């Protein structure tokens, strides 16, 4: 059995986190960069006027693969001054944990006025693999800086690349999208920094749907994440269901890849 089932799911569903790692090895939401003609990168739009993030919020999800509950994912949001702090955890459970244990941690944040990411850190423990990585944005120099340590091999790498003045990251993107108008037929496009490059991500609002979760029944808008490079291009699809109200709370996430479907079901919302 292979691994890398969830790295997204927070990294842009995860878009997203790292528990997807538990089920199939190295099935990544981000593929190696391919030589393509560079297209203009869109400007990250600030949150729409009047949108308010909660002071504190914890969203807990179960992560299902086929008929199995593969793990849990928990997102924490906390306001600290003008910054929305984000953290997420991804942990395998049950049979999946016995086959390929996952204990992943992610931290991010973004400016509440501009939506610009303040950086992205992750600590990955997937099977025997242990990685600690930090992504720093040096806006004065127009650089993104990644420092990564392999905790098993005892090695370290340092990389730098150009980056626009204002971008989001793989974790912040899920919650940045909340702050934008989500009307059916609309595409919200923004620059996302990942793996030493900046890609344009489009969040396409496909339809309205009623979604039933353990946390309740919600009227939602179904949003598909797309990208011309990087995110699961020609290998799968990612959707996030946001509540069809001014809060736009993510209540379900799903990644359909060639080896199966991973679904995040909201278990609870805690505003403490």
Image (cartoon, grey):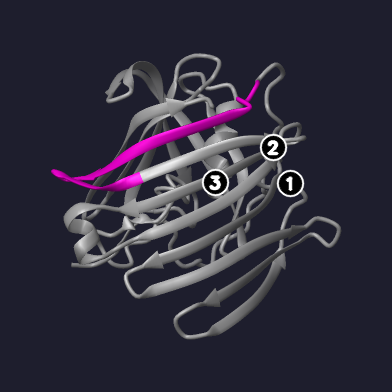
The local crowd at label 3, few if under 14, some if 14 to 19, many if 20 or more residues have their Cα within 10 Å, is many
Residue 84 at x, y percent in the picture: 66, 37
Q: Residue 87: say if magenta.
A: no
In the image, which is nearer the foreground, mark 1 or mark 3?
A: 3
Q: Residue 217 sits in which quadrant?
A: top left
Q: Position of residue 219 (x, y in %)?
A: 37, 14
Left/right of residue 98 with respect to residue 218 in the rendered view: left
The numbered dot on residue 115 is 2
- Dominant SS of magenta comes to strand
Quadrant containing the N terminus in the rendered view: bottom left
In the rendered structure, the answer to whether residue 217 lies left or right of residue 190 reads left
Q: Disc 1 and disc 2: Cα gap in Å?
A: 8 Å
Name which of mark 1 and mark 3 comes first in the sequence. 3
Numbered disc 3: secondary structure:
strand
Q: Is residue 84 left or right of residue 82?
A: left
Element at badge 1? loop
Q: Is residue 59 magenta?
A: yes
Provide residue 233's location: percent of width, then percent of height.
40, 53
Residue depicted at 39% across the width and 51% down the height:
90
Please tell me which of labels 3 and 2 falls first in the chain.
Answer: 3
Q: Are marks 1 and 3 in contact (CB under 8 Å)?
A: no
Q: Is 195 in front, or is 203?
A: 195
**Eyeballing the image, is 18 above or below 202?**
below
Q: Residue at x 47, y 51 (%)?
A: 11
Residue occupying the far right of the picture? 140
Left or right, 146 with respect to 250, comes to right
In the rendered view, would you say 36 is above or below 131? above
The range drawn in magenta is 52-72
Residue topped by disc 3: 87
- Image marks 1 and 2: residues in contact by CB distance under 8 Å: yes
**Which disc is residue 166 wearing?**
1
């Amino acid at each position: 059995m292979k691994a890398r089932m969830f790295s997204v799911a927070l990294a842009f569903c995860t878009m997203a986190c790292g528990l997807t790692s538990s089920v199939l090895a190295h099935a990544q939401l981000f593929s190696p960069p391919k030589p393509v003609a560079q297209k203009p990168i869109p400007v990250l739009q600030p949150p729409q006027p009047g949108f308010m993030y909660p002071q504190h919020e914890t969203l807990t999800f179960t992560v299902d693969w086929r008929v199995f509950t593969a793990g849990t994912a928990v997102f924490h949001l906390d306001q600290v001054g003008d910054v929305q702090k984000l953290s997420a955890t991804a942990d395998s459970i049950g049979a999946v944990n016995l086959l390929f244990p996952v204990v992943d941690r992610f931290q991010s944040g973004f400016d509440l006025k501009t939506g610009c990411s303040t950086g992205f850190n992750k600590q990955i423990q997937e099977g025997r693999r242990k990685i600690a990585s930090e992504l720093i944005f040096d806006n004065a120099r127009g650089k993104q800086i990644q420092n990564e340590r392999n905790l098993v091999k005892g090695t370290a790498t340092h990389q730098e690349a150009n980056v626009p003045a204002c971008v989001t990251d793989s974790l912040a993107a899920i919650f940045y999208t909340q702050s934008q108008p989500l009307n059916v037929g609309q595409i919200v496009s923004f620059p996302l920094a990942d793996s030493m490059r900046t890609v344009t991500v489009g969040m396409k609002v496909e339809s309205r749907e009623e979604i039933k979760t353990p946390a309740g029944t919600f009227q939602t808008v179904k949003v598909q994440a797309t990208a011309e490079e990087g995110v699961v291009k020609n290998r799968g699809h990612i959707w996030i269901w946001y509540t069809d109200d001014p809060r736009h709370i993510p209540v379900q996430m799903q990644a359909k890849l060639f080896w199966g479907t991973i679904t995040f079901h909201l278990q609870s919302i805690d505003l403490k």
